[in-house]
Image: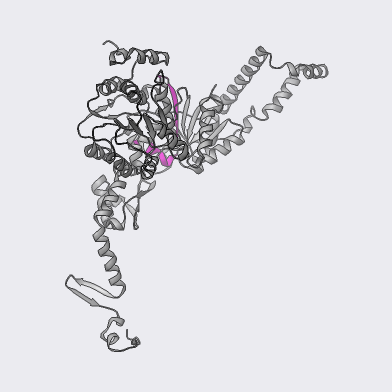
Amino acid sequence: MTEITFKDLGLSSRTLEWLEKKGFKIPSPIQAEVIPLLLANKKNIIWQAATWTGKTAAFGVPLIENLRHENHIQAVILVPTRELAIQVAEEINSLQYPKNLSIVAIYWGQSYEIQNRALKKGVDIVVWTPGRVMDHLNRRTLKIEEIKYFILDEADEMLNMWFVDDIETIFKQTNPEKRVLLFSATMPRGILSVAKKYMGEYDLVAIKKNENITALTEQFYIQISERDKLEALCRIMDKEDDFYGIVFCKTKLDVDHVFAKLHEKGYSTQALHGDVQQKQRENILKLFKTKKTKILVATDVAARGIDVNDISHVINFWLPQDPESYVHRIGRTGRAGKTWTAITFVTPSEYRKFVFFQRATNNDVKKIEIPAIAHVIETKKKKLKANITEMLEKWAHEKYITIAQELLQEREAEHVLAALLRITYANEFNEEYYTTIEKTSSSTKAPGQGKTRIFIALGKTAWYYPKTMVDFITDETGVPSREIDDVRVLEDFSFITVPDYQSEVVIKTLKGTASKAKDDKSSSSSRGWFRSWSRWWDRWGYKWSNRNERRPSKWWFSKDRWDRKNYPKRKSSD
């Protein structure tokens, strides 16, 4: 078959020339399908594809082709995080030449004054986070009635972050004739519900199931105990000639802990999570993109929108919550046809969960051993020799020649050099300096012994109780009721415990229940009122023996109370 080029997609000569200068040679499969559909300007589109398929260019290039500068917003692009908003705006802006369209990112953490000034000046394409759109709509500083395109990028993430209500509110205030483009790595029920409600007719474009991230990545896992993870991470980084990567952690506390330990050991590293201030976040990303920092320790959400083509490694210090997050993590560097390495640390209790990830993502991940100490030391010695050779060739040691000559007159050369290396590198070439790592196995824990505690956004206000909650979980997921344990139902949410190997089934199936919970709450408002009334009734002593009979059961509701001014004294027989 003849290979498809950008020229075959119907783009203008000016755009083709600029894409070639930027290094775009051959369109990715999804670009080859989506760009002609958007240029035709006819139907709405749902695009199911991962983050590593070149999606920003797939919708950004047609927007540049179809739009001309006007005095109002023509395209709104919604993304889940501010990092992704910045990245998408920068990438679309880089795809146009000359700069005819005004493209800005507006997000939380940026002053309203700057945003209002940009909106009044006239913007063609705005990349937003949903919360900030709602703020501007409430302040009446945003007009989106005349937009031509409404784009939802990473819609599944916005669904997970409970942005569905905001998205529906925004939809209602937009031009009914607009084109809607929805991009999602997965296709949960909530996404299809939004599509059915607001998109009308649409084309569904999806990557074939056998096209997965293994084409561009080497995926490995290491079985390890939790206490040895940091030592293993250091060995992996030390044995590489030029490590440049992202270390993913589960929580903010994990990020801070790993960052502090690496910083103590002298690694060039930065930490990124939700508590980092916006200005500091931008500085951290700038340092990382320019390779002044080689290691970025981050949570999943904080790392959204990081677009760095030549990352060498992605390390899963902790397993993510679900298979989709795993794909997002290791797929973020697979751009421009470059390969990279993904290594996942798996503790014995996480082994079943990791096997589920492999099946769900259709990936065969190879097991490897932690680098041996001798191998790490040998690599460090090679790096040292290379650095010294480079310094000699650049003549960067001129200021130190005088003191070197003095030392060589007093001592033998090899002893002087060895002493300097000992001062500079301390114990790095000493095997006793490294921590011994114990062997682990997935069989360390008996099958089914591991348990997972799961949060569910449904509770008593939605008319759920332990028995009905178990029935609901069983009906929705197929998990037998005997495997659901320690059910605790509170007012607005619940907790259940299931075996590790069933946890991902429950989480994946019930992902969209957040919006369902809200619907259940509203639909059960009358039942909630009834329950409140019945609790009050019970508090005062009534028993509901049948629907037509209400009778007081406590002594102070006896007829004597109403016949006498003072309450009767309770008898000992009571």
Quadrant location, the N terminus? top left
Whether residue 371 appears in this view of the structure is no
Q: Position of residue 462 (x, y in %)?
A: 28, 55
Q: Is residue 389 magenta?
A: no
Furthest-top residue in view?
Answer: 2
Asked whether residue 215 is in view, the answer is yes
In the foreground, 312 or 353: 312
Report the front residue among 531 and 346.
531
Colouring chosen for the image of the structure: one colour
381 or 443: which is nearer to us? 381
Residue ID at (66%, 30%): 427
Q: Residue furthest left?
A: 548
Q: Is residue 261 left or right of residue 449?
A: right
Magenta stretch contains residue 336 = yes
Provide residue 553's location: percent of width, then percent of height: 27, 78
Q: Position of residue 250 (x, y in %)?
A: 45, 40
Count the numbered circles shown. 0
Residues shaded magenta: 335-356
Within the image, what quadrant is residue 526 found in? bottom left
* Quadrant of res 378: top right
> Residue placed at 31% from the left, 55% from the top?
459
Provide residue 33's location: percent of width, then percent of height. Answer: 27, 21
Quadrant housing residue 116: top left
Q: Does residue 482 appear left or right of residue 349 in this picture?
A: left
Residue at the image point whose x is 34% and y is 22% from the top = 64
Is the residue 446 above or below the residue 412 in the image? Answer: below
Q: Residue furthest bottom?
A: 564
- Relative side of 493 to 378, left or right: left
| Screen quadrant of the C terminus | bottom left
